[in-house]
Image (cartoon, helix red, strand yellow):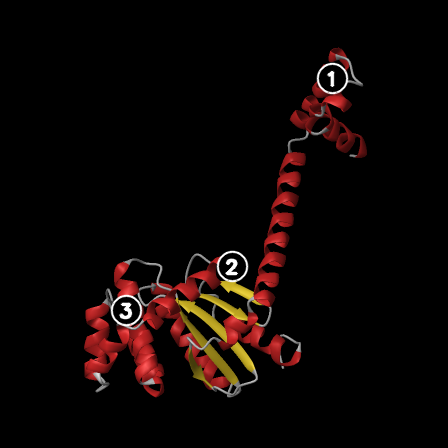
Amino acid sequence: MRVLTLLLTLVFAGLTAPAFAAEFSDGEKTEIETIVRDYLLANPEVLEEAFSNLQERRRAEESQAQQQAVTDNRSLLLNSSRQAVIGNPDGDVTLVEFFDYNCGYCRRANDDLKRLIDENPDLRVVLKEFPVLGPPSVEAAQVAIAVNDVAPDRYGEFHDTLISSDGRVDGAAALALVREMGIDTAAVEAAMEDDNVQATIEEVYGLANALGLTGTPSYVVGDSVMVGAVGFETLQAEVNKTTCGELSC
């Protein structure tokens, strides 16, 4: 294996460098390449192993970059003035969720989030409006952000109801819910015209880009970033790690 590593290094790296390649004649280079080729044809599993190692290395690098991005953006993730908070607003542990009202996985995962809040009275949940599924999602997010500005004490109920909707949700559907809940619709519509609404969405897009997030739901707990509807148990384990340093407290 050490010989193979050397040969691969020569073929794929050294032989492409003019100064290094000059040390070998054309015949020697051809012979080395033939030896490597024959070895790989006889032992193709080596390529699988190399590819697997490369994937693991890249995953580790991506995870490290994500953790650094969390560190660099922690204040904006946890304490932005443009965010909605549910659960215990004074809780010692914070979970951040990036979501889209038209995301089917977000809708199913909402039960996991509610259970997490019920079973962890010290949990603070920051909700990031991350509309990635087209204009209807953007419209719904705009209404939700305005609701949080006008009636922050009603936002949790509004969010839970809207994320539990069947079918496509857009601005009209979100405003219909505002009226149904008895929230000041005129005030919400006025708030939607404020620059804060678009600034909030752009802030979340920027955070998602920094963290490498492209889909919903996505979560941040402590230094951990989780993508997809990972389930209650996984979320609880991450909350526990942040709370007591163990998977189970």
Residue position marked by numbered label 2 in the rendering: 210
**Residue at 80% over, 34% down:** 2
The alpha-carbon separation of the residues under discs 1 and 2 comes to 45 Å
Q: Which mark is residue 29?
A: 1
Number of residues whose C-alpha sits closer than 10 Å to that of mark 2, classed few (under 14), some (14–19) or many (20 or more): some
Q: Secondary structure at mark 1?
A: helix
Q: Which residue is mark 3?
A: 140
* Three-letter code, disc 1: Lys
SS type, badge 2: helix
Secondary structure type for disc 3? helix
Question: Does 84 appear above or below 64?
Answer: below
- In the rendered structure, the answer to whether residue 55 lies left or right of residue 78 reads right
| Category of crowding for the residue at label 1, using alpha-carbon neighbours closer than 10 angstroms: few (below 14), some (14–19), many (at least 20) | some
Where is residue 163? Give x, y as percent: 32, 73
Kindly identify the residue that appears in the image at 52 percent across and 69 percent down: 220
Q: Which quadrant does the N terminus fall into?
A: top right
Question: Cα distance, mark 3 to mark 2?
Answer: 24 Å
Query: How would you rate the neighbour count of disc 3 (Cα within 10 Å): few for under 14, some for 14-19, many for 20 or more?
Result: many
Q: Where does the image place residue 124, in percent across and percent down from the top left?
A: 49, 82
What residue type is disc 2 on?
Ala
In this rendering, which labeled residue sits more in front, label 1 or label 2? Answer: 2
